[in-house]
Amino acid sequence: MKRLFNLQKFAAPDNMTGKAQIQTKAREIDFVSSFSDSLQALLDIMGITRMIKKANGSALKKKTAAGVLQDGNVAEGDEIPLSQFTVKEETFDTITIEKWRKSTSIEAIAEHGYDNAVAMTDEEMLTLLRDDVLDRFYDFMATGTLKSSEATWQMAIAMSIGRVKDKFKKMRKNATGIAVFVNTLDVYKYVGSSNISIQTAFGMDYVKNFMGADYMFISSEIPEGTVEATALNNMVAYYVDPADSEFAKAGLEFTTDTETGFIGVHAEGNYTRMLSELYAIMGVRLFAEYIDAVAVITVDSTPTLGTLTVQSVAGTETGDTKITVTPAKEDTSHLYKYKVATEETEVAYGQNVRGWAAWDGESDITAATGQKITIVECDASYQAQASGTATVTAKA
């Protein structure tokens, strides 16, 4: 006689959360938490209080600011002159959700164990995702337009800080602090055997209150002999939310940090191929809002004075000459200064020409025919970068 058993009574209920599900979810949470916490620590240091959420495919724009403040000494009843300021935007990239996948075979797990085959490779993947964010940030910083050369590393740091502060002052903005980015070997060449307190956030080593910088970030991604700097409040962070409900509607659900939304992670077993797979999606970008407030200073122990080709022809008014200079200024923050004399004026690299006459690069200059006019291109600190001389031809 056959006996019938109601096996349904002993079967696991539908959608039960079992050991496998808990372990998989914990793996996702660990990955997301580790990435998000370390990135948030870096953002806190940079003074970025919140990430700016962007739609997938949004344009990323860098800005340059310029303006002229008119004379405020206005007579009673006269019209107050208009001071014009402009901010130009230029698209340099787009922010998009990017996708990554890692798989580990059952054979690798059996041979090396879970911790080595899965957990350690998860950690390596997390490191590479972090490096992807930082590499793009370093590439962007290298395009800063406050450029110059200095004879020593110490002077390069000092000038990078000074040029950023000077730029913010001209923009009528307050720099909340200065972040300097330097090469690892340059730092250790300078400090030698001295002890410095190095901390780490999101894989970036940094020192607080060092050599005039509020934060000095140390990285091998910065070329040796190069110093980059900007104000802390010039740095911004954008992200595309990986928890977008549209993804979930399509059956693509990811574990995310609801407070930050930096990264989405999903782990699952592929039984068809016997693989443990990990998926990650992310759209995070760090950059500086004003590219003309990012200093890139190179160290050149034997800097040389550049050469300008100066030409003089008769100007518009009697006694004036029209000057043309080539090549154009290598840095938009550079200035022109000039001196008229009976003989050519010698100029040395780095010479301070603050006391020379200013020239806007276009206006005619009053000078007598036959005299020598020397044009100097100088940086914002009035240090000579290039010069050239011509014999004056003035309108008779």
Image: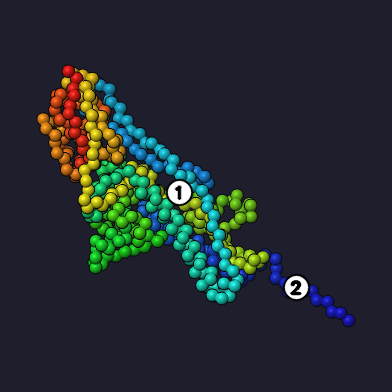
Q: Compared with residue 322, is residue 223 higher up or lower down, i.e. above or below? A: below
Q: CA distance from mark 2 to mark 1?
A: 52 Å
**Residue 75 percent location from the top left of the image:** 21, 23
Q: Which residue is mark 1?
A: 238
Q: Secondary structure at mark 1?
A: strand
Label 2 crowd bin: few (<14), some (14–19), many (20+), radius 10 Å = few
Q: Nearer the viewer, residue 72 or 126?
A: 126
Residue 70 occupies which quadrant of the picture?
top left
Q: Nearer the viewer, residue 59 or 153?
A: 153
Asked if disc 2 and disc 1 are in contact, CB closer than 8 Å, the reply is no
Q: Residue at x 21, y 38 (%)?
A: 387
**Residue 4 percent location from the top left of the image:** 83, 76
* Apparent side of residue 335 relative to residue 367 in the rendered image (left or right): right
Q: Residue furthest bottom?
A: 1
Residue 9 numbered mark, or none: 2
Label 1 crowd bin: few (<14), some (14–19), many (20+), radius 10 Å = many
Residue 17 appears in view: no
Residue 284 appears in view: yes
* Apparent side of residue 380 relative to residue 32 in the rendered image (left or right): left
Residue 162 numbered mark, or none: none
**Residue 50 percent location from the top left of the image:** 43, 51
Give the amino acid at mark 1: Tyr
Q: Residue at x 57, y 64 (%)?
A: 103
